[in-house]
Image (spheres, helix red, strand yellow):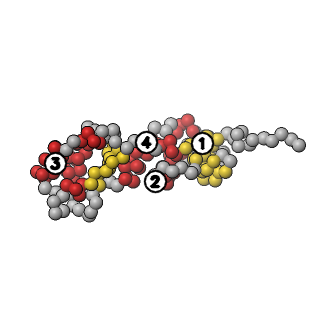
Amino acid sequence: MGEIINKVKSLDVITVDVKDFYLSGKREQINLSDYLEDGILVEKKFRKKLMDFDWSIYKDKYVNIFIEENQIIPSWAFLLLSHYLSGYSKNHVIGDTRSLEEKLYNISLNNLDISSLKNKKVIVKGCSDIPYIEYVYSELTRRLSKVVLSLMYGEPCSRVPIFKKRLK
C-alpha cells in the first residue's frame, strides 16, 4: 500500500478569512427621535441638549445615528451630531447598524493589499459568524475578481469554484 498524500496541504491556494475584516470594538446607537418634541426638532433645545451631553461615553466606540420613526429631520442636525461625536467615537455613520458595519468593513477591506493576490488561487473562507457577512463576500469578490486567477468559496478540503480566469 502506498503512502497517503495530503493533497489539501499541497494546494497552492491562499485562504482569505472574512472574519479578519470585522473591526472589533463596542458598538453604540443614538436614536435621533429621542431629541424630538411631538415629532419636531426644536433647534434651541436640541443644541442645548447636545452641548450639555457627556460625549465621552462614546469614546473609542463605533456609533450609528438613526431615526426610529419616519420623521423629517433637518440636515444640519446630522452635521451637529457628527461634530460632537467626531471628538470621541472611533467612527460613526448616519443610518442603521448595517450601514455602520458596511462602513467599517470597507475601511478594513481598503487595507487589504490585493496586489499581493495577483494571479493567485484564492479561497474565501466560509462559516464565519460575523454580522452582514454577505456584504463582505460581495465586496471581497468584487475587489478580488479583478486580480486573482481563480476564486473559490469554502475550505481547501471542500471548496466551491466561483470563477477561474482563462490563461491566454
Give the mark nearer the N terminus: 2 vs 4: 4
Residue at 86% x, 41% y: name it. Answer: 2
Hey, what amino acid is under mark 2? Tyr
Give the mark nearer the N terminus: 3 vs 4: 4
For disc 4, the neighbor class at 10 Å (few under 14, some 14 to 19, many from 20) is few
Task: Give the mark toward the camera: 1 or 3.
Answer: 3
For disc 1, the neighbor class at 10 Å (few under 14, some 14 to 19, many from 20) is some
- In the image, taking residue 23 as reference, residue 2 lies left or right, namely right
Q: Is residue 1 in view from this perspective?
A: yes
Give the mark nearer the N terminus: 1 vs 3: 1
Say which mark, if any, is on residue 132.
2
Q: Position of residue 45 (x, y in %)?
A: 12, 51
Q: Position of residue 54 (x, y in %)?
A: 21, 42
Distance from Cα at disc 2 to Cα at disc 4: 13 Å
Task: Give the mark toward the camera: 3 or 2.
Answer: 3
Please name the residue that numbered disc 3 is placed on: 49
Give the mark nearer the N terminus: 3 vs 2: 3
- Pointer 1 and pointer 3: residues touching (CB < 8 Å)? no
Q: Nearer the viewer, residue 87 or 76?
A: 87
Say which mark, if any, is on residue 65.
none
Please name the residue that numbered disc 1 is placed on: 15
Please name the residue that numbered disc 4 is placed on: 23
- Pointer 2 and pointer 4: residues touching (CB < 8 Å)? no
Hey, what amino acid is under mark 1? Thr
Q: Is residue 149 in view from this perspective?
A: no
- In the image, taking residue 88 as reference, residue 15 lies left or right, namely right
Distance from Cα at disc 3 to Cα at disc 4: 31 Å
